């Protein structure tokens, strides 16, 4: 825009700050302790031993804590065996097999996260929700890192309830009427060739999802487009869709919606894919970062008017 | 975002543009389209004489149909002749910022030369959309042209609106935007001796989609010169949407580029067009007289 007058840098900050307070987790739990990692997203969980069978009461509290805090961090766990991690994740639902990535021997549900000196790319280096290109994208993902670099390799998580809340009523109303295409061909084709995956015969999924997604547990509305998979808002012209997506991506990537998690050896993050996005930094080359990820199946995203 | 085929959607666009074509015929004037989308050359009228009522009626209709009328074969009009002709279309408007002729306050002198600091209307705009009742139309005769250069581009805002998706139209219909002239006019005419330190420049709200009072058609009514904000949205949302709309409305398929000859006249409908004046002729001179016809308050009426 030409010769636009300079806006005051701090204009509107109080409005934003009040808005963000809607995202503050209020849950109280009987069988676990949860300490907020930021005021907007992330809870640090203690009082659970994942190597032992976890009680139904604790699973119930963890499910609520996940819906409340969007991502749960566990700092005090030992290194889980594949079976321990799979069993624990199974308590939250059936497990998902990744459409493209290589998996651990004998455990197709286990996605090995491994970045090192010879890697060509890292996993999830841009903002995304996991495999939103699927018809039924995962409910959540549980990652434990066994080998962490001395410094670096943090993961950023962003709260998509808060990102939606921060939009104007007028924009919210419009987006509630929209669906978007999520595609993966452009992401996955040749993506794992450095790890020996030949995908010549593979067809990568694409799906249409609501732009505003109602969380099936909390009933709250979350912004559900991401820079990695979302290619087009349906029924808009390409130029219109590009302009709107560009705005939404820039909007949802603002720092006030985020937590930045610094991994220690055997830290676990368990994130709710339905109301978050995340990004993994690769700022530690040539060092190594390795871990196991398991992913819980989700339901088809929907939007329901409040 | 994924790679897109370069020529995707061109047929849709071409078909949508055909809606802008107006094949009207007139009893008392002859009009020749300059492009299929906007602008006609008018013949059969002598503007230095008293123009008959039937011709005024045809010209009014032609203006609504074709958005801008060009007259090539007129003599240099005296201020009185130009003012008298323009008055046939409505009361005349006095510009809130520009210097005016002492004898003829309705006459806005357009003059750009080797010592000018700016030219008039170099960015896309509709005239003084910052006013509560922006002009219906503007009539400009250029008396001295720079030889080559100094063209004016006009764009059809019906066509720009038509080219949006139904979904985007639905989003924009009924929205209100702020048109703010402080940023456009403050200090603007200092090089012509205008002291504006006590002036208050107008700001008004208008619908983003404007219903033309004569044709009843919908036109996109935001412009990069005056429109600062869409109401009811955050600043970032409004910026993103306006940025898109300004780029969208500036697509060449909505435009005509008019090359002025000495004494050419353009008479444009401010309610359904935007225009832009090129300053590509420095240090040469371009001089003319503009008269502006008052308009009504913009409104939106759903179809």
Image (cartoon, coloured by chain):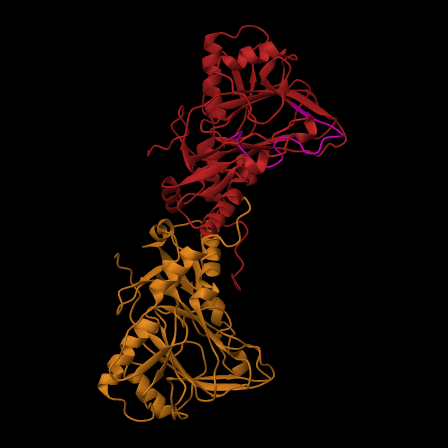
Measuring from the top left, give residue A195's x and y in whole percent: 68, 26
- Residue B210 image position (x, y, % from top left): 32, 62
Question: Residue A8 at x, y = what percent?
Answer: 53, 54
Quadrant in the rendering for residue A83: top right
Q: Residue at x 33, y 34 (%)?
A: A305
> Is residue A267 rendered magenta in the image?
no
Give the letter of the orange chain: B
Q: Specify the farthest residue to the left.
A: B54
| Quadrant holding the N terminus of chain B | top right
The answer to which image quadrant residue B217 occupies is bottom left
- Give percent across and percent down for residue B85: 31, 87
What is the span of residues highlighted in magenta in the rendered image?
A: A113-131
Q: Is residue B258 above or below residue A80?
A: below
Mark yes or no: residue A47 visible. no
Q: Residue at horizontal 37%, vertical 84%?
A: B106
Q: Colour of chain A?
A: red
């Amino acid at each position: 825009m030409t010769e636009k007058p300079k806006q005051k840098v701090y204009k509107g900050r109080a409005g934003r700050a009040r808005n963000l307070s809607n995202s503050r987790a209020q849950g109280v739990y009987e069988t676990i302790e949860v300490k907020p990692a930021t005021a907007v997203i992330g809870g640090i969980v203690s009082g659970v031993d994942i190597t032992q069978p976890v009680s139904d009461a604790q699973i119930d509290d963890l499910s609520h804590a996940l819906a409340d805090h969007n991502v749960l961090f566990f700092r005090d766990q030992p290194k889980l065996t594949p079976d321990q991690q799979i069993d624990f994740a199974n308590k939250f639902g059936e497990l998902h097999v990744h459409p493209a990535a290589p998996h651990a021997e004998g455990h197709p549900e286990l996605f090995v996260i491994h970045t090192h000196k010879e890697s060509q790319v890292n996993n999830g280096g841009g903002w995304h929700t996991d495999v939103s290109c699927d018809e039924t994208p995962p409910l959540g993902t549980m990652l434990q890192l066994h080998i962490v670099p001395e410094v670096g390799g943090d993961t950023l998580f962003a709260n998509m309830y808060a990102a939606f809340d921060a939009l104007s009523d007028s924009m919210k109303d419009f987006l509630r009427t929209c669906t978007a295409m999520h595609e993966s061909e452009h992401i996955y084709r040749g993506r794992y060739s450095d790890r020996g995956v030949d995908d010549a015969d593979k067809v990568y999924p694409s799906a249409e999802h609501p732009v505003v997604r109602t969380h099936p547990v909390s009933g709250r509305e979350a912004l559900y487009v991401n820079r990695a998979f979302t290619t087009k808002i349906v029924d808009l012209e390409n130029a219109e869709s590009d302009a709107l997506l560009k705005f939404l991506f820039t909007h949802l990537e603002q720092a006030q919606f985020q937590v930045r998690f610094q991994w220690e050896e055997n830290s676990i993050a368990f994130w709710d894919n339905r109301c978050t996005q995340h990004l993994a930094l690769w700022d530690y080359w040539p060092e190594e970062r390795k871990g196991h990820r398991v992913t819980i199946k989700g339901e088809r995203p929907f939007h329901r008017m409040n | 975002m994924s790679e897109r085929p370069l020529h995707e959607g061109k047929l849709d666009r071409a078909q949508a543009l055909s809606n802008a074509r107006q094949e009207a015929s007139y009893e008392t004037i002859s009009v020749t389209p300059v492009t299929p989308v906007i602008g006609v050359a008018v013949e059969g009228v002598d503007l230095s004489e008293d123009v008959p009522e039937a011709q005024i009626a045809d010209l009014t209709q032609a203006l609504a149909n074709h958005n801008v009328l060009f007259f090539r074969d007129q003599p240099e009009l005296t201020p009185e002749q130009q003012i008298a002709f323009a008055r046939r279309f409505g009361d005349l408007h006095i510009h809130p910022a520009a210097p005016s002729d002492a004898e003829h306050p309705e006459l806005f002198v357009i003059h750009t030369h080797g010592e000018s600091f700016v030219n008039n209307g170099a960015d896309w705009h509709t005239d003084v959309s910052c006013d509560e009742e922006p002009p219906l139309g503007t009539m400009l005769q250029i008396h001295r042209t720079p030889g080559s250069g100094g063209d004016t581009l006009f764009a059809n805002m019906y066509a720009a609106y038509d080219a949006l998706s139904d979904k985007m139209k639905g989003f924009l219909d009924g929205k209100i935007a702020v048109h703010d002239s402080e940023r456009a006019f403050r200090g603007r005419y200092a090089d012509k001796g205008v002291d504006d330190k006590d002036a208050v420049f107008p700001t008004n709200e208008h619908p983003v989609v404007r219903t033309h009072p004569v044709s009843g058609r919908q036109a996109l009514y935001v412009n990069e010169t005056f429109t600062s904000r869409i109401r009811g949205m955050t600043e970032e949302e409004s910026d993103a949407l306006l940025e898109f709309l300004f780029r969208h409305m500036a697509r060449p398929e909505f435009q005509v580029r008019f090359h002025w000859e000495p004494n050419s006249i353009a008479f444009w409908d401010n309610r359904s067009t935007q225009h832009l004046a090129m300053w590509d002729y420095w240090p040469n001179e371009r001089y003319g007289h503009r008269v502006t016809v008052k308009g009504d308050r913009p409104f939106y009426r759903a179809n």
